[in-house]
Image: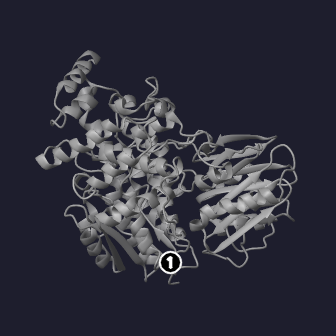
Amino acid sequence: MCGLLAYFSTDAPRVDDTVVSDVQEALHCLRHRGPDENEVWHDDRVVYGFNRLSFIDIENSHQPMPYADGRYRIVFNGEIYNYLELRAELAAAGAAFATEGDTEAIVAGYHLWGEEVVTRLRGMFAFVIWDSETRTVFGARDPFGIKPLFTTRLADGAIAFSSEKKALLEMLGGSTAAGGVDPASLQHYLTLQYVPEPASLHRGIRRIESGTSFTVSGGELSTSRYFHPTFPVRPVTKDEQQPLYDRIAEVLDDSVRVHMRADVTVGSFLSGGIDSTAIAALAKRYNPDLMTFTVGFERQGFSEIDVAAESAAAIGVEHITKVVTAEEFAGSIPLVVWYLDDPVADPALVPLYFVAREARKHVKVVLSGEGADELFGGYNIYREPLSLAAFERLPQGIRRALGTLSAKLPDGMRGKDLLRRGSIPLEQRYYGNARIFRDEELTFLEKRDPDLSHVAVTRELYERTRAAGYDDVTAMQYVDLFTWLRGDILVKADKMTMANSLELRVPFLDPEVFRVASTIPVDQRVTKDTTKYALRRALEQIVPPHVLNRRKLGFPVPTRHWLAEDLHDWARQTIEDSQTDEWLDKQQVLAMLTAHRQNQRAGSPVDHSRKLWTLLVFMVWHGIFVEGRITPEVPETVYPVRL
């Protein structure tokens, strides 16, 4: 696990002491991603910077790593869980190895199999390989986008890649040199609560998309998608149901087994839900001394500490908790946003940061349950097609009339949103598992493009689902793989754990698990009464009974109450101090904050907290990365770890 930074001259040998020094200085922005090693290597065209957090074979697997007598040089961020099997296969084909780790398996695989190596990797990864013989670059990100990779073209024409955008901003010379704020990305952020790939909030910096490989040749960067998720769903008879549940349990157990490969202690995050509990219970089989970690708040209804503690006791693991106060929450926000690179308006980022910080005092690696909902049908919104089935049978004229009626109903009235959503097709109403500002609500956005819509983000995705003949539930899951999962869930997982030099591994997001999950029929994913039906049945003998059918909470955050009470003054000050007038009508934002407080005090169901939080996170981000007015105090070191 590491932070990588790579510079490639594209037209002539340009590397000199100044370029090497620039990379070294920018690499400091990534120190939290790898405090165990810091290396810079270069030739006349390439500079590699690398920070490493070590787990396996640190004595030999130093990076940037050479291969084939120095023909290749690789930097790699991630973990390859089938590296032992790959090394055996490569050795049988004549490959020679100088190390015992997974990095060399990637570059040896590239030497033997070429670009097809990415389809053989079971793990999370972002890597860049320089071939000094052909003067070309090859790299890739893992199928789901667990590990990040940003890219930009520098002023001298060179192309750079980095695990974090802030290092590229340093190389470019700041926000203005990076093209400033991208209006389209900001508009999408306000709708989705994250900036969709491959864009970033700066015009001049992009992301390599999940599931794609790339080459740099002749000075040009080109990408190619190698991961094309499919859902070869097939019905199961009553006699086939239990074998299906057994296959799910077996593949999850195998995934956890390989995700436990490390030479350091591995722990596990544990909320009150079925996903993290299942991972912890399976991990206990391979580490009897497993430690689990959870986080909560003092406000009733916003903490799963008690349920998590009960689960930990039931599976027999040592359990550590962290309670976050409103003051701690507010004080951490600038630092959390700095680690993010781009704003992500998910309040769960903050408790995740704190539980990661607590875990890092004890372990270097944790397992977690991300991805279970997207693969097995875990979000309540996936049940919506069942509740809207009656609308689908109505003539379009009647559906449009119901939509018109819904617009006339008061905000917060029961049934208003059901009528609105039932009146429009799936492609227009569902754009990922987030619902912040609808297009017509963006009146405060000073540079709104009326022709730009969330539909632009998902149009191609829906075209693929329709071409494949997927039902609405499967289409929603497919869309989430390319939106919510990689835009929110995996960003916060990577950024908040790496902020604390802690590696997070996600056994549900394993190619073998996906291969099984993708075949599950809809009636085994969602029903009128529950979600993740097949997964719950598969885990009946693994998780304690008290969490088997428990409602999903995750790490809930009381922002609704805090923005009306404890954090109200902080929010008002943040808005007033922000220099975002070019982008936002701040008076409208202040009016929304006042209305939210009044609504909460009056007991009104109208809740603006998610909208306000989205705007506040952008303002803090702007204060850090554009204005330079906010300077978080970034820790230089990480906690010692008990090995």
The kind of residue tagged 1 is Tyr
Q: Where residue 536 sits in the image (x, y, percent)?
A: 32, 59
Taking depth in this image into account, of 82 and 248 the one nearest to the observer is: 82
536 above or below 455?
Answer: below
Q: How many marks?
A: 1
Q: Residues within 10 Å of mark 1 (few under 14, many from 20)?
A: some
The residue under label 1 is 639
Taking depth in this image into account, of 174 and 510 the one nearest to the observer is: 174
**Left or right: 420 as drawn, with respect to 73:** left
The quarter of the displayed image where residue 305 is located: bottom left
Taking depth in this image into account, of 501 and 115 the one nearest to the observer is: 501
94 above or below 476?
Answer: below
- Which residue is drawn at the image coordinates 65% and 47% (left, top)? 151
- Which residue is drawn at the image coordinates 51% and 66% (left, top)? 634
Residue furthest out toward the left: 602
**Left or right: 424 as drawn, with respect to 6:** left
Q: Where residue 501 sits in the image (x, y, percent)?
A: 53, 70
Q: Where residue 393 sits in the image (x, y, percent)?
A: 26, 24
Quadrant of the image containing the N terminus = bottom right
Mark 1 lies on a secondary structure that is loop
407 above or below 589?
Answer: above
